[in-house]
Amino acid sequence: MNSISIKSFILSIIFVAFLLEGYIFYNFFENSKNTISKLLQTSIQADVLNLKHFMEKNLKQKDINFIASHVDNIIIINPTIEDIHILDNSQNIIYHANIRYEGHNHTSQRCMPISKIINTNIFTQECYSFSIKTFHGLQTKYYYANVYIDKAYTHGLITQQIRKILIAFLVSAFIFILFLWILSKIYLITPLEKLRQYAYYSHNPPKNFFVKEIESIRYSLNMTFKRLQQEQEELYNLSTKDPLSGLYNRLSLIEKINWLIAKSKRDKSEFAIIFLDLDNFKNINDSKGHEFGDKILLHISKVLLKTTRENDIVARLGGDEFVVILPDFTDENTIIEIAQRLKETLATPFEIEDEEYQITASMGIAIYPKDGRDVQTLLKNADIAMYKSKELGKNNFQFFTNAINKAVQEKIAMQQLIKNALQENHFKLYYQPKVDIQTKKIVGCEALIRLIDPVKGVIPPYKFIGIAEENKMIIPLGEWIIQEAVSQIKKWAKTPLKDIKVSINLSAIQFQDPELLQKIQKYTQDIERKKLDIELTESVLIKHFKERLNVIKGIKKLGISLSLDDFGTGYSSLSYLKDIPFDTLKIDKSFIDNIYTKDDLTFINMIVGIADDLHLNVVAEGVETKEQLKLLQEIHCKEYQGYLCSKPVPPKKFEELFSLHCV
Amino acid sequence: MFNNKSDYVLNLNFGDILAKTLLILLFLLFTACSSKPQKQIIISTNQWIGYTPLFYAYETGELDALNIKIVTSVSLAEAGDLYSIGKADMVTTTQHEFNVLKKTTHDIKAVILIDRSNGGDMILSNRTLRALKKSKKIDAYLEVDSINQEILLDFLKKNAISKDKINFINKDQRQIQDVKNDPDKAILIATYTPYEIPLKQKNFKEIASTKDINSIIVIDALCARDTLVEHERQRLIQLKKVIDKAIEIIEKNPEASYKIISKYFSHVSYKEYRHSLSLIKWINKPSEELLEYIQQYGYKKDDIIL
């Protein structure tokens, strides 16, 4: 189907209306002409009838002059009649009304009988005739009268009428078209154009329209756009907001930081990013469940929104990580003030499900452009600073610095190194002999981990053990150590080293593995477990003592002996010796280093005494000199371990050492 | 999506619109033409008792339904004048007026026969016939050049009264009605019913009437222009039916019809109305012989609607 514009449509309507109006006016003109002709006809007929009666009564008695004035009066009064001729029976003119038309001759014109007068011939016929009957006694005498029509007058009437009607038609048509056009413009075209624009741009909704149907469309469009906008907002929120907290999500945060970077570049201004991570949130999640954790997160979100300023941007990156952007700050004090306020407000105890809780957060702060010129760098550096804050004891905030950055980078590199080493078997176990002080024979050894990187060479344990514990890689690494030590025991089982007891260390982190005991049982099932010794530091026993005690007892029950490492340092408690079935006490190297002092010697002597009373073996660690050995021998310490005999060595070297007596 | 203003269109077929518009225009033209009113027919007549059916049909609205109007005059001549100047399309005439109009206008046909006078046209006098014959001078009132004249001349001729002693005075019937009965003057009046009633009250006596005159039969007919007969044949047939119906009612229930048409005959009592009716014979359903007979008066039997 072809389409036309509304303008063309209305113009067509106007054109049709113009034709209709023309038709109406034509009819009106015809009716008007008809009315005029009827009036003229009536007027002529009335005058003719009057003249006929007058002449029939008077023509016989009076001479022609008597009726002349009457005839003249009719001509004067009736402008339609131009002239009247009175003719006798022989058609001779006996009177000619030449008052105004002297010399005018109508004889050549043919007259139509007045009986045939009709409105259609009134404007074409020039002359009508009628008979006049006079009586002289019973004698009838006929006269005739010709009535001449003033065609100029009758045509003038029509011309005048045509002019009037034409003007009326044109004026009314013009007014009508103008009126119709204005109305169409106001009530149809303009509203429809506004609707079109509204439909296209979907903003600036037009006001109410007069025409009901158009108003209905406007209303429907309005409703549709509102619904669309609502859905758009919902979609926008879904894509830009975190559904749990209602805060901006990672995507929006990146957008906003990018926008701030662009703005700051233009304005040469700065902004700060606070990377916030809740302390120990995992514990809450693990112990109370995710649903409860979500409530905590919601509470934290509210606190963050409440604590920050109106222009600040708060986002949740996921989990328990939040980011606060401070677009406007005058100096670092402002940041410190806000960070401090965040720290204090977050640490305020709150109630959930009628229980009081307190949660803290560690924050890292990075500033644009000083600490990064792009989103990734800024977020990474703020995260690094936060990490440092956590390292420094949590519930605090830390500005990003290059030193922090370097340390963290190294740590990250080390983490990667540990991961790769595990995969590519770069870890090795070195063995440091434990020597019987009396016999000078090697009776055992402590298996110590070494990372031998193909590029960086041997990396000492203090560089990676802490990191492995932090990221819990110590768990797989610990498993590897057990398996490797067991493997070594198996290798030595048919050699002279078959009675060597191998000690390995268990990290406190390894006790977080709920399957630790089962794994030890599994890995040691092929050896005599009495050949394996597990050294525990006091730090293992500080937390979750009860649970860990069960594991330790389980290990002991397997037949594996236990050693208390670094005894005498830290938080040593004699109650451990009572509760835990240790087999060996290892005196910490710090005591051995200071064995020449009276206090430390007394202390070592006391430890040896306690061990002796409790029927425990005693191993002195870090023995490096013969003097130290001599003193230990004097106080009846049973075994020693240290560089005096040998540093930790690979298995081959250890086997060579075994055949020799140390010192 | 609309790209610009010109893309904003109505899904209408322009051809369809124009076609529908033209149809509407044609419909309007058609209705305008079809609703054009039927041309009104005007019948010029006079107050003759024989035309009572026309008055009755007019008063009962039967003629309105045919868009026919009646204009009454005081004389046959005046009724003829209205016709001759074109003010009326039909006219009631006797054969005399019919022939006069035919002679002057050449445009008349008798289409409906209504009645014939059976005593309705009469001669009144204040003298006896014998006295009249002896009178040296007689004033005779009549409508000259009408059926009155024919009847009066026929009366004079039959009674051997010389026209020389007659002073013919031309008056219409309204004027004749007012003629005083001067005992010193011998007066003759040619009139017709019901105009004779007030004259008889002035002691004018009927000395002759169409009841007695066998030589003249006065036929009253309704005549029309040739063009009207040609173009409005059906309407004239309807008119004839209306007249037939009116005559039937008048005959069956004259009292009821009197009440309806009495205003046309002022000062005429019901009794006088009944008497006047007795002086005419309805010939709306003429015999073949009558149709043949009236041809001598110039009526053409083929023009008559039966």
Image (cartoon, rainbow, N blue to C red):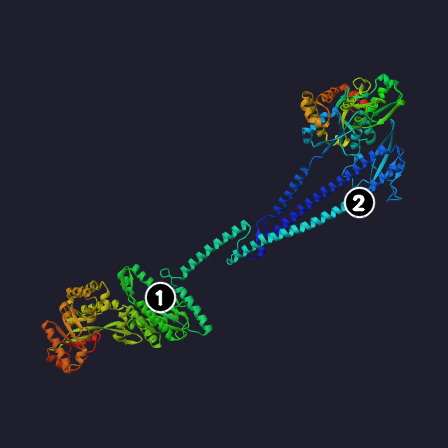
Q: Nearer the viewer, residue A532 or B218?
A: B218
The residue under label 2 is which amino acid type?
A: Tyr
Q: Nearer the viewer, residue A358 or B163?
A: B163
The image quadrant of residue A554 is: bottom left
Q: Nearer the viewer, residue A183 or B72?
A: B72
Q: Nearer the viewer, residue B213 or A168?
A: B213
Please state the chain letter of the residue tagged with numbered disc 1 in the rendered image. A
Q: Secondary structure at mark 1?
A: helix
Left-right relation of A533 to A427: left
Q: Mark on residue A141?
A: none
Where residue A307 sits: x, y (%)? 36, 67
For residue B89, say whether it is visible: yes
Up-down: is A161 above or below A650? above
Q: Which residue is mark 2?
A: A153
Q: Secondary structure at mark 2?
A: helix
Most distant residue in the left direction = A613
Where residue B264 sits: x, y (%)? 72, 28
The residue under label 1 is which amino acid type?
A: Leu
Please state the chain letter of the residue tagged with numbered disc 2 in the rendered image. A
Q: Which residue is mark 1?
A: A304
